[in-house]
Image: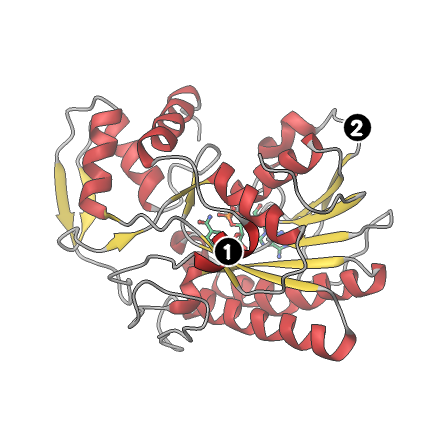
Amino acid sequence: MRAPRRRWTRAVVTGGAGFVGSHLCTALIEQGTQVICVDDFCTGSPANVAHLAERDGFTLLRADVTKPFAVPDPVDLVLHFASPASPADYLRLPLHTLEAGSLGTAHALALAREHQARFLFASTSEVYGDPQQHPQNESYWGNVNPVGPRSVYDEAKRYAEALTTAEAGVHGVDTAIVRLFNAYGPRMRARDGRAVPTFIRQALAAEPLTVTGDGRQTRSITYVDDTVEGVLAVAGSELSGPINIGNATELSMLELARLVIELCDSPSRIHFVERPTDDPSVRCPDIALARDKLQWEPRTPAREGLARTVAWFRDHPEA
Ligand code: NAD
């Protein structure tokens, strides 16, 4: 991993017991930063950070960030990742998702302000909605249906970006916004509804892979180690963002499904099903900003990252 430009003494990671958050906690601990992981386990689990439990400097705090929360020690970095993130989760938890983006972000910002810590908000490519500009750069404002089923997530993130920007202007909080594009890797949940774990679960069970629509819709998938490296590069910089962190190599859902079948050495076939409402037809980041300012770009080819992810799912049938 490239050396971050700043070193932190102690970081708060909200949502640290989730998929991306747990990898972030691990990377911070590995580089010598103490970590307070704050999570209510609504979609995450203590099992995701069990490997850190005995490590010096790691604290797991059960708290719901939609309520005011405090941490036991001074911190110099707040990484706000707490939010249901997969469509299955935010459709099941619509109000909690809106509150994580609104109240949760306000409380995480208040913590950063109180501790004079740098604050980084985990936003999403979903702020671009079903984009009319392709690929999407950070100056594109997006095409989001404010009352569609996905709006609880998309609009919460858009509001949280606005709140983060306003806090920086009004209270001088040192803030950054990253827009993450479809991270994947170990510790995803097999039934969280996202394409990668769904396809792997189906392929390992020799079931048909359910590709929505005609499968020509694209996503850019980023191996989680690359995502974490990008997030820490932004945290360690002076940049406020928003900055796209994703893979500029586009993959159609059909290509992804075929690759998973091959890597799982599975007899599964592909079964086409209806596309969900407001499902974006293309999604690919323009990452010129991260390349130019941070010398960051993803390094893990899809075939390699997916092979590692398949291996993890084989070892964790309970996931
Ligand atoms: P995840 O569901 O695995 O992790 C989210 C974590 O936040 C979970 O541990 C959950 O228990 C916790 N959480 C949710 N609401 C909370 C609350 N009110 N209080 C405390 N903890 C709470 O999802 P993920 O994929 O790891 O996503 C993490 C963050 O990154 C989210 O904010 C998500 O929007 C953002 N993001 C992720 C991706 C991706 O591809 N994984 C893409 C874009 C943005």
In-front residue for pair 284/124: 284
Query: Quadrant where the N terminus lies?
Result: top right
Type of residue at label 1? Answer: Asp
x then y, percent, for residue 119 = 70, 59
In-front residue for pair 231/257: 231
- Residue under pointer 2: 56
Residue shown at the point (38%, 77%) measured from the top left: 147
Residue 298 against residue 203 in the figure, above or below: below
Disc 2 residue lies near ligand 1 with CB under 8 A: no
- Residue under pointer 1: 292
Residue 205 at least partly seen:
no
Q: Which circle's residue, 2 or 1, is located before the other in the chain?
A: 2
Q: Quadrant of residue 115?
A: bottom right
Viewer-nearest of labels 2 and 1?
A: 1
x then y, percent, for residue 177 = 58, 62
Residue 151 against residue 246 in the figure, above or below: below
